[in-house]
Amino acid sequence: MLKLISIFRSGPGDWIRLVQAYLWLFRAKRLMKRARGNQWLINERQSQTAPGTGSDATDEDWNRIKKRVAAVSRASRYPVSWAFCLQRSFALREWLAKDGILTEVKYGVRKRDGSFDAHAWVVYDEKIINDSVMHISTFAVLKTLDDYGQGSTEEVRDALLTSKSVGVTDSENATRPA
């Protein structure tokens, strides 16, 4: 209940970002639903432009990143937790790219307690912006899907779409480098 109250205390800028985050999340969900098989993952990787280095990022860019990470995180949890890590990551990447902030979606896998888990997160300037380093460190990062063959690509896709072991931390992880 307190979290819901905090939404109502937000200013107009936060409300606008929250609505925009919902729209980007719905857009990402629609893209993932319309794609067939693993084609959406292959297309996503092929269409990815090289992410910015962030070295020329201004304080304003980092502030925009931090606010958008918080908005996507909040929108994905209210009214209930409904957006998985892949959807959140696609939405955030596309929303930031709209303003010229090029990021990269990274994928990781792990086997824990006999089950296969997969996760996706966003990186900018080699910094994880929508998750914690501690959480990501439990996953083996996939460099390219081509190295794993067709069967594994489908397994990764299915795990990314249904994984329950995902979480987005608060926006403190999107901080300006020292």
Image (cartoon, grey):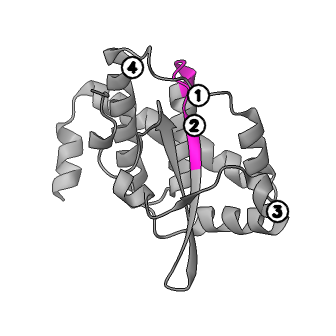
For label 1, the crowd category at 10 Å Cα-Cα, with few meaning under 14, some 14 to 19 and many 20 or more, is: some
Mark 2 vs 3: CB contact within 8 A: no
Of 38 and 81, which appears nearest the observer?
Answer: 38
Mark 1 vs 4: CB contact within 8 A: no
Q: Is residue 31 above or below residue 68?
A: below
Q: In the structure shown, which secondary structural element does the residue marked by tag 2 occupy?
A: strand
Q: Which residues are magenta?
A: 97-106
Q: Amino acid at mark 4?
A: Asp
The reply to whether residue 78 is visible in this rendering is no
Q: How many marks?
A: 4
Task: Locate residue 72: give its quadrant.
Answer: top left
Q: Mark 1 to mark 4: distance in Å?
A: 14 Å
In the image, residue 102 lies in the stretch drawn in magenta: yes
Q: Which residue is mark 1?
A: 51
Q: Which residue is mark 4?
A: 61
Q: Mark 3 to mark 4: distance in Å?
A: 38 Å
Q: Mark 2 to mark 4: distance in Å?
A: 16 Å
Q: Amino acid at mark 1?
A: Pro
Q: Mark 2 to mark 3: distance in Å?
A: 22 Å
Q: In the structure shown, which secondary structural element does the residue marked by tag 3 occupy?
A: helix
Q: Amino acid at mark 3?
A: Gly
Give the mark nearest the N terminus, 2 or 1. Answer: 1
In the image, residue 174 lies at what x, y percent? 34, 36
Q: Which residue is mark 3?
A: 149
Which is more foreground, mark 3 or mark 4? 3
In the image, residue 144 lies at what x, y percent? 71, 50
- Of the numbered discs in the image, which one, if any, rests on residue 104? 2
